[in-house]
């Protein structure tokens, strides 16, 4: 049987454990009186309100330094990347099975909606070969030069709604990323090559894959709301000897000061993709 001293020790231990939460003799909760808890809660309330106020003031001052139309810092992305449409770096399909390439056709058709005549007729027919400069205009909203999907000829989806995929001669659209204020020197154009010994015939739209200077500079999403990037369409004129083979294709921006050989960024001024057509 437990001794009287053991029972007293257990009772004292239980009482001490309960008193650590609430002590009825002093009125303390977790070691603090009501006034002590009120003071410490008031301190933290004031402290965190001060921090929130400092954060809001800092953000307000920062926003005052920003321009709604032009980013303050633009030096981190001086050169554009090259983007491919359909949005896939591995184009593989059976030309005899529409279900195998319908996803590519739908993607191209959806992407080209902004290039329809109904949309582009609102833009200006700018003179070719010259930058469309609008820096001196007082109006912050800038005009845009039209680029109709008809400029892409056989790859426009107008005469051939399958963009050549049903014939095993797929079309690929290329565009450069938008960079505010970019004015490429020279005469930029897109050139594509297949990494193998024997070349593959390709057809470019517009002619020779040219990117006209009139589509530069770009003034930003808010100022240039109706702007669309100029496109270059490449139709791969594959033959039966090219079917059932994986063909690596690389396209680059040539003829200008735009960089296309940075090993740290494989998409800077260039893009590489694979095409496999099954007969």
Image: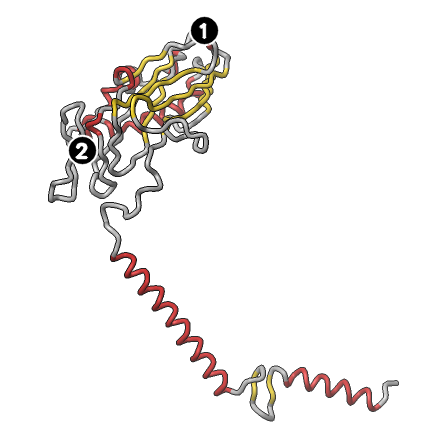
The percent coordinates of residue 170 (x first, y second) are: 38, 16
Q: Which residue is pictured at 25% across the width and 41% down the height?
A: 221
Q: Looking at the rendering, which quadrant does residue 136 occupy?
A: top left
Find residue 202 and name its label.
Answer: none
Q: Which residue is pictured at 32% across the width and 62% down the height?
A: 58
Colouring chosen for the image of the structure: secondary structure
Q: Secondary structure at mark 2?
A: loop
Of callouts 1 and 2, which one flags the residue occurring earlier in the amino acid sequence? 2
Q: Residues within 10 Å of mark 1 (few under 14, many from 20)?
A: few
The percent coordinates of residue 122 (x first, y second) are: 15, 32
Q: Which residue is mark 2?
A: 144
Q: Is residue 206 above or below residue 259?
A: above
The percent coordinates of residue 249 (x first, y second) are: 43, 19
- Tell whether 13 sits left or right of 268: right
Among all residues in the image, which is located at the extreme bottom? Answer: 25
- Does residue 110 appear anywhere in the picture? no
Q: Secondary structure at mark 1?
A: helix
State which quarter of the image contains the N terminus. bottom right
Q: How many marks?
A: 2
The percent coordinates of residue 143 (x first, y second) are: 15, 35
Q: Which residue is mark 1?
A: 240
- Tell whether 41 sits left or right of 50: right
Judging depth in this view, the residue of 255 and 139 nearest the camera is 255
- Tell whether 93 sits left or right of 4: left
Disc 1 versus disc 2: nearer the observer: 2
């Amino acid at each position: 049987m437990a001794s009287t001293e053991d029972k007293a020790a257990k009772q004292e231990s239980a009482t001490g454990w309960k008193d650590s939460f609430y002590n009825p003799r002093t009125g303390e909760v977790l070691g603090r009186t009501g006034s002590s808890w009120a003071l410490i809660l008031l301190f933290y309330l004031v402290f965190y309100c001060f921090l929130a106020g400092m954060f809001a003031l800092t953000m307000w001052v920062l926003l005052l330094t920003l321009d709604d139309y032009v980013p303050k810092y633009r030096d981190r992305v001086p050169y554009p990347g090259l983007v491919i449409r359909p949005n896939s770096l591995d184009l593989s399909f059976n030309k005899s099975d529409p279900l195998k390439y319908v996803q590519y056709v739908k993607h191209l058709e959806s992407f080209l909606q902004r290039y329809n005549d109904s949309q582009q007729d609102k833009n200006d027919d700018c003179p070719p070969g010259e930058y469309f400069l609008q820096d001196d205009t007082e109006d912050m909203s800038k005009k845009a030069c039209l680029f109709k999907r008809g400029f892409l000829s056989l790859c426009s989806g107008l005469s051939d709604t399958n963009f050549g995929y049903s014939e095993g001669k797929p079309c690929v659209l290329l565009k450069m990323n938008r960079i505010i204020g970019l004015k490429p020197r020279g005469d930029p154009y897109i050139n594509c090559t297949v990494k193998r010994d024997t070349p593959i015939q390709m057809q470019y739209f517009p002619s020779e894959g040219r990117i006209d200077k009139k589509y530069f500079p770009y003034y930003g999403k808010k100022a240039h709301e109706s702007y669309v990037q100029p496109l270059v369409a490449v139709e791969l004129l594959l033959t039966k000897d090219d079917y059932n083979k994986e063909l690596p294709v690389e396209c680059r921006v040539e003829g200008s000061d735009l960089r296309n050989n940075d090993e740290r960024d494989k998409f800077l001024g260039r893009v590489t993709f694979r095409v496999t057509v099954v007969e």
